[in-house]
Image (cartoon, helix red, strand yellow):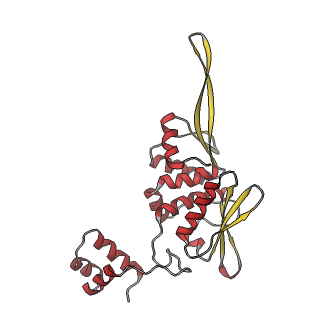
């Protein structure tokens, strides 16, 4: 009996063009078994299985997005019998954000309901699972800005693959897009000009550093007007960030 990791490595190698003989020699799996794996897709994880513990695969796009939401407006809470609740607080003014948060959770933890709990001014998107701490090892006691927030190596790899969606989660949680203005004298007359600016605010220096890193990955310039506020103000930079984040409403 081969574990999921061996099966996944074999199927990925064959899909990349490696021959049956080469994969068989390298992984110690018979050619007959390899042919069978190609004919029959890998069975899905059981609803209670964790893609990290069971060597499954996380959907990188949905995970990158959900990680950004979690670092911004999410939390894990320990319940009875080892179960944890993942809660993402979403402003009721932006129903698209609520739908996207629920969709990302459903993609990562399918076959279990995602709940929408109404509170004053916001909706908490909630999911229950024993393995949420496996996927969010940043979980710990106290507010995020009072503890160290570092990504594991496998998390960084997923963000490098999908930095735009990670930024989408961060900015949809703790970001905003505003219209700034300035006055210039043109031909002796003072004229007012407006321009868009995106801002990300967070009290955690570690989360702020992750936002800076992701912006660097997609080549978007930024500056820090305050220690807890990041600004993207150049016209071309705002346009590039708009493609990643999209409108909130």
Q: Residue 56 lies in what quarter of the image? A: bottom left
Residue at left 60%, top 51%?
A: 172
**Which residue is nearer to you in this view: 123 or 34?**
123
In this view of the protein, which residue sits in the foreground, 114 or 2?
114
Residue 127 falls in image quadrant: bottom right
In this rendering, the count of numbered labels is: 0
Residue drawn at (48%, 69%), measured in percent from left and top? 58
- Please state if 118 lies on the left or on the right of 76 as rendered: right
Which residue is outermost to the right? 120
* Residue 59 in sight: yes
Give x and y (percent) for residue 190: 63, 16
Using the image, determine if residue 78 lies above or below residue 166: below
| Residue furthest out toward the top | 188
Rendered view: 24 above or below 243: below
Q: x, y (%) of residue 148?
A: 61, 59
Is residue 101 depicted above or below 210 in this figure? below
* Viewer-closest of 135 and 237: 237
**Split into 4 quadrants, where in the image is the N terminus?**
bottom left
Residue 200: x and y, percent?
Answer: 61, 46
- Asked whether, in this view, residue 184 is left or right of residue 235, the answer is right
Q: Residue at x 48, y 42 (%)?
A: 240
x, y percent for residue 233: 55, 36
| Up-down relation of residue 168 to residue 225 (above or below) | below
Q: Is residue 148 visible?
A: no
């Amino acid at each position: 009996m081969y574990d999921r990791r061996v099966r996944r490595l074999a199927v990925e190698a064959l899909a990349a063009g490696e021959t049956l003989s080469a994969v068989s020699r390298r992984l110690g799996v018979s050619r007959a078994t390899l042919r069978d794996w190609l004919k029959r897709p890998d069975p899905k994880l059981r609803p209670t299985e964790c893609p990290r513990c069971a060597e499954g695969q996380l959907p990188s796009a949905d995970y990158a997005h959900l990680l950004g939401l979690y670092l911004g407006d999410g939390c894990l809470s320990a319940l009875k019998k080892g179960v944890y609740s993942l809660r993402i607080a979403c402003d009721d003014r932006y129903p698209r954000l609520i739908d996207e948060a629920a969709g990302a959770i459903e993609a990562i933890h399918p076959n279990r309901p995602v709940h929408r709990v109404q509170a004053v001014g916001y909706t908490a998107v909630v999911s229950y699972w024993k393995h949420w701490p496996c996927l969010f090892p940043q979980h710990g006691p106290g507010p995020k800005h009072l503890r160290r927030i570092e990504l594991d190596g496998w998390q960084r790899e997923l963000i490098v693959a999908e930095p735009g969606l990670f930024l989408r989660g961060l900015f949809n949680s703790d970001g905003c897009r505003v219209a700034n203005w300035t006055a210039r004298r043109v031909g002796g007359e003072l004229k007012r000009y407006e321009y868009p600016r995106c801002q990300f605010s967070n009290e955690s220096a570690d989360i702020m550093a992750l936002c800076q890193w992701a912006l660097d990955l997609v080549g978007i310039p930024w500056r820090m007007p305050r220690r807890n506020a990041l600004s993207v103000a150049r016209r071309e930079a705002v346009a590039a960030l708009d493609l990643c984040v999209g409108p909130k409403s």
